[in-house]
Amino acid sequence: MVVTPDGRELCVELGGDPDGRAILGFQGSPSGRRMMDEWLDGARMDGVLLISYDRPGYGDSTSNPSRTVRDCASDVRAIASALGVQRLAVWGVSGGAPHALACAALLDGLVCGCVVFSSLAPFEEHGLDWFDDMGCDLVADAQLLLDSPEAAREAWKKFRVDLLDLSSEQIELRAQKLPTADMAAISYFRRWLLATNFKDAFAPGIEGKWEDGCAYLSPWEIDLEAIRVPVRLWHGMSDDVVPMQHSLWLDGRIPTSELHSARGEGHLSVFINHLVESQTWLLEQF
């Protein structure tokens, strides 16, 4: 447990090589700190100290109801200080990607490189129709939060209860209900998320998911054009959850970005298929 300057607690998980170069991963929304065995095995082999944590409101971390995307940077600084880490790289996937970008923008001197997969762009920014071609479930969630916050809370409470009640057979069925572009690569990843990470994240309630949703639809309070560390943006060209136009928009505003568009890959497969090479690239930034 790491205590932040304002007295909150963050539950941090470490794996890989304890003496290795530090990489902190931001998982999606909803998601907790738990990491797959495959990631930890690879980290040990590559000399990486892999760090993950429950964002506020998830798992065992104290909630922070007014948090913005920007606020994660001060939490990461507190984690690095507590661990004695003076240099680290970050990656983020889906709803975790904006938080990784915040660290790249605000922690120059601590963060040396950043990779994001399937990232959202900021809401209501010039030059982007945020909802255009977005997956219908994500559109419905965001629109409900904008139109009726109390109804959104009730919907997420029901989602949480249904998720915590899933049997292993139901998890198996849900793991198979994926877009074709994602199926081959990540049915096992989806199964792990449903059985392990999501359940741990939602154990205390919906506050983490609620805070994430509010943060994405509010100003991020970061200057993307001020980013000076190397950034790689990965996006599947067949992503039907967060459309690739979001990464195209980000690429046009981050001066150090390099966009990799993956043909035939979707929202999750681009992360699973390119995480290893991305961490190798991050190690080169130290």
Image (cartoon, rainbow, N blue to C red):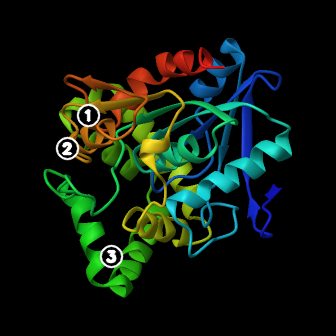
The amino acid sitting under disc 3 is Leu
Q: Does residue 23 appear left or right of residue 2 in this picture?
A: left
Mark number displayed over residue 145: 3
Confirm or deny contact between disc 3 and disc 1 (CB under 8 A): no
Residue 42, image x, y percentages: 62, 18
Q: Does residue 171 appear left or right of residue 79 in this picture?
A: left
Q: Does residue 266 appear left or right of residue 211 in this picture?
A: left
- Camera-nearest residue between 244 and 166: 244
Residue pictured at 34% horizontal, 42% vertical: 175
The amino acid sitting under disc 2 is Asp
The secondary structure type at the circle numbered 3 is helix
Q: As displayed, is residue 158 above or below residue 103?
A: below
Report crowding for label 3: few under 14, some 14 to 19, many 20 or more residues within 10 A (C-alpha). Answer: some
Q: Does residue 106 appear left or right of residue 174 in this picture?
A: right
Residue pictured at 20% horizontal, 31% vertical: 237
Which comes sooner in the sequence, label 2 or label 1? 2
Q: Which residue is mark 2?
A: 240
Residue 96, image x, y percentages: 48, 48
Quadrant where the C terminus lies? top right
Residue 260, image x, y percentages: 31, 24
Confirm or deny contact between disc 2 and disc 1 (CB under 8 A): yes
How much space separates mark 3 and mark 2, taking CA atoms?
Answer: 21 Å
Q: As displayed, is residue 59 above or below residue 183?
A: below
Q: Which residue is mark 1?
A: 266
Residue 77, image x, y percentages: 72, 48
